[in-house]
Image: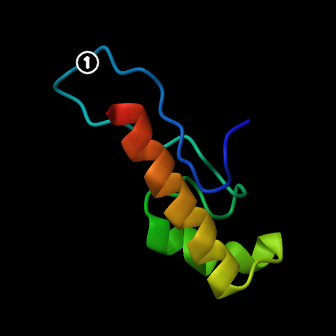
């Protein structure tokens, strides 16, 4: 299971092109390309600011463990 707030990216065989975020909240929002933008929409998930920040902190720790 992917933790909330984790962006997923397709493998990019084209090194000259940037990776493209694939996570959309809705057709109206388009792709979520930053943690700040994700936080502004956390109310849609019934998350308060504190809970959303805890999830992002857990995601950041998980990312460092994957890359180590």
Judged left or right of residue 31, residue 61 is: left
| 1 is higher (above) or lower (below) than 45 | above
Toward the viewer: 62 or 12? 62
Residue farthest to the left?
Answer: 16
| 21 is higher (above) or lower (below) than 44 | above
Judged left or right of residue 34, residue 67 is: left
Which SS class for mark 1?
A: loop
The image position of residue 50, as x and y in percent, is 64, 84
Judged left or right of residue 4, residue 22 is: left
Toward the viewer: 48 or 20? 48
Which quarter of the figure has residue 20?
A: top left
Residue at the spot 68% in from the left edge and 54% down from the top edge:
4
Residue farthest to the bottom?
Answer: 49
The residue that disc 1 covers is 14
Residue at the spot 42% in from the left edge and 39% down from the top edge:
65
Q: Quadrant of the N terminus?
A: top right
The image position of residue 32, as x and y in percent, is 53, 58
The image position of residue 13, as x and y in percent, is 31, 14
Number of residues whose C-alpha sits closer than 10 Å to that of mark 1, classed few (under 14), some (14–19) or many (20 or more): few
Residue farthest to the right?
Answer: 46
Toward the viewer: 1 or 65? 65
The image position of residue 12, as x and y in percent, is 35, 21
Q: Quadrant of the C terminus?
A: top left
Total residue callouts: 1
Which quarter of the figure has residue 63?
A: top left
Residue at the spot 27% in from the left edge and 36% down from the top edge:
18
């Amino acid at each position: 299971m992917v933790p909330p707030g984790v962006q997923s990216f397709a493998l990019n065989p084209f090194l000259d092109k940037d990776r493209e975020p694939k996570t959309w909240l809705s057709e109206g929002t388009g792709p979520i390309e930053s943690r700040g933008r994700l936080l502004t929409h956390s109310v849609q998930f019934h998350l308060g600011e504190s809970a959303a920040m805890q999830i992002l902190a857990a995601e950041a720790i998980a990312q460092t463990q994957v890359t180590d």
